[in-house]
Image: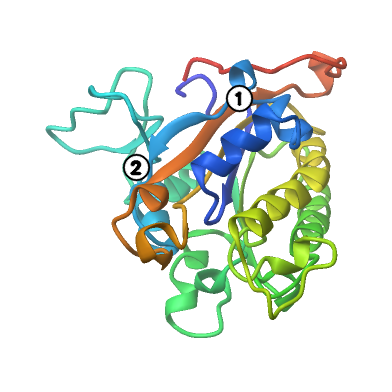
Amino acid sequence: MNEIVGRDDLLLVTLDTLRYDVAVELAAAGRIPNLARHLPGGVWEERHAPGSFTYASHQAIFAGFLPTPAAPGTHPRLFAARFAGSETTASRTFVHDTPDFVGGLAATGYHTACIGGVGFFNKQGPLGTVLPALFEESHWERSFGVASPESFEAQVACAERLVARVPAEQRLFLFVNVAALHQPNWFHTPGATEAAGDSRATHAAALEYVDRHIGRLFAAMSSRRSCFTIVCSDHGTAYGEDGHTGHRIGHPVVWTVPYAHFSLPGPADGPLQDGDTVGTEEP
């Protein structure tokens, strides 16, 4: 990351509430081709969420505690605040002297921007301002929220306008919290009704909806230069497993999340060809 920071633009996308098992099934079945073509080896990495709901997980993520690889061992982090005794700060880690890596990137000259999704980013009350306040620029509107069937399309359009406004010479860190997977998501299944409610199947349909539009986001963020990209879930959610519904609980379907990071080539690198996969760049 010491080479990537200052050279590339950066994109962090949290697919809020996305379950690991659903993400894996859809990738294997060819139902999310636009995401799958960028996943290293075409598969999601299994990780453990740093929190069981959006606010807690994002506070940890912005402090550098991205979802942890599920395999045992000490796993070096991409970003870390400078503090003595850290066992996960390695020589390749981007180390910053701020409480969060958003501020650390800003201190190196990045323009930092947030496009919110779920209520913790809506800036409609004191709690909804905490996470957006980490960024120099933040956006939220009702069309980005959980109740909008076109939420991700609206977020992508905002991202396209934002990228076009940032001077070409300035590095950009963009964070997008995608609300489409979060309940309610029944409306992403054709013919579904509100009365029937949300299910694991409508959750999967919401991921397919996101996949249909995420290529525009990737294209915008790689239109200036190469872009180091992280796509992950902040936590999963339950649809009746062991009697549980929702999240903010200690259940495996909540704690187990999909993760990937990869590089999107910029104009100077040439376009991806059909069938190409951009793998993991060693951070």
* Tag 2: amino acid: Phe
Q: Please name the residue shown 49% across and 15% down the image.
A: 282
* Picture coordinates of residue 123, whole percent (x, y): 55, 78
Q: Which mark is residue 262?
A: 1
Q: Please name the residue shown 47% across and 24% down the image.
A: 1
* Picture coordinates of residue 278, whole percent (x, y): 68, 18
Residue 37 picture quarter = top right
Q: Secondary structure at mark 2?
A: loop
Question: CA gap, disc 1 to disc 2?
Answer: 18 Å
Mark 1 or mark 2, earlier in chain? 2
**Does the CB distance between marks 1 and 2 fall below 8 Å?**
no
Residues 249 and 73: in front is 249
Residue beneath disc 2: 65
- Please state if 178 lies on the left or on the right of 154 as rendered: left
- Please state if 131 lies on the left or on the right of 43 as rendered: left
Residue 199 picture quarter = bottom right
Using a 10 Å C-alpha cutoff, classify the residue at mark 1 as few (fewer than 14 neighbours), some (14 to 19) or many (20 or more).
many
